[in-house]
Amino acid sequence: MSKPKIGFIGLGIMGKPMSKHLLDAGYELVVHDLVQAAVDEVVAAGAAKGVSPKDVAARSEVIITMLPDSPDVQAVALGENGLIEGVSEGDVQIDMSTIAPGVAIEVAEALGAKGVGCLDAPVSGGDVGAINATLSIMVGGEQALFDKMMPVFEQMGKTITLCGPNGAGQTVKACNQIQVALNIIGMSEAFVLGAKAGVDPAIIYDVLSGGYAQSRVHDARGPRMIKGDFAPGFKARFHFKDLNIIMKTGNDYGVPLPVTSLVHELFAAMMAQGRGELDHSGIMTVLEDLAGIEARTKQE
């Protein structure tokens, strides 16, 4: 069976390496992004350039979107010159953005009316997971379509799970983002408390790595946090966006999220301080400000 031609829209920190993995696997790609430099880089790697979402859809059999937020997905999928104007019956649309579950369902219903199969497939793993093709991919949609698209998913991730019908992938991603945020806040508080008490955060990190406090978030972000390296792997403003989705989803389903509510407010403070372009682990800077100390390692 020949590989389908893939359209890829959204070539940011995550989308760019994801698209390159598909190229490396021998898929023919048509790409589009508002940032021309990102398009040029992926085109130089072997992709073709699409001039609009409609154009990408018209030239592809499978269209993947990796976009910042729900309104972006709505505009690209359903807006003027959007996917809905270029798709054909039998095409497949895979949205790998993190958006509201209700929007995922809305897009699936609109494109489904034109005979397009849709999967919502948000990811976890950050820039490291995207670069190494080890993302966790949470999928909502039909089993048969999920099975058909598995070879595509396998080029970008390692843990690939069908979570339920359309929207379920986004629901599970919301759950994921709760736990990631709480892990980061927990690490931040530990490092800041230890530093204020005079203990080198590098020692705290090493000790916590050997016990129950250890986690994948701890391993991936801890070493950078104690060095004060908050270059974005996953921008704080995107995690704040995810927390907004989480709070709305909790409200929609009548689920109190008391601890997540506090984390949401800490991220809101980070946004108010103009730090949204930092990595989400940069939330530690808010706690440092509150404590009046920088929790940075003394070791070289």
Image (spheres, grey):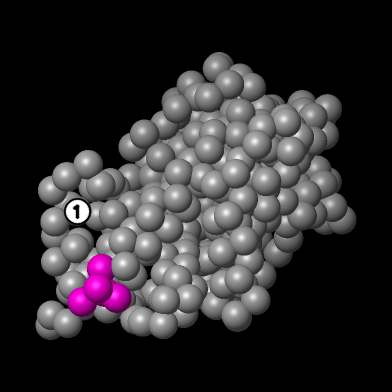
**Going by the image, does 85 lie left or right of 93?**
right
Looking at the rendering, the stretch of residues picked out in magenta corresponds to 194-198
Q: Nearer the viewer, residue 244 or 265?
A: 265
Give the residue type at disc 1. Answer: Leu
Residue 197 belongs to the span the image colors magenta: yes
Describe the element under mark 1 as helix, strand or loop.
helix
Q: Residue at x 78, y 49 (%)?
A: 74
* Residue visible at 23% across and 47% down in the picture: 214
**Is 239 colored magenta in this rendering?**
no
**Residue 242 visible in the shown view:** no
Q: Residue at x 25, y 47 (%)?
A: 213
In the displayed orientation, state which residue is furthest to the front: 197
* Quarter that holds the N terminus: top left
Question: In the image, is 224 to the left or to the right of 92?
Answer: left
Residue 258 vs 281, above or below: the answer is above
The residue pinned by badge 1 equals 208
Residue 73 pos. (x, y %)? 72, 51
Residue 172: quarter of image: top right
Main secondary structure along the magenta-highlighted residues: helix
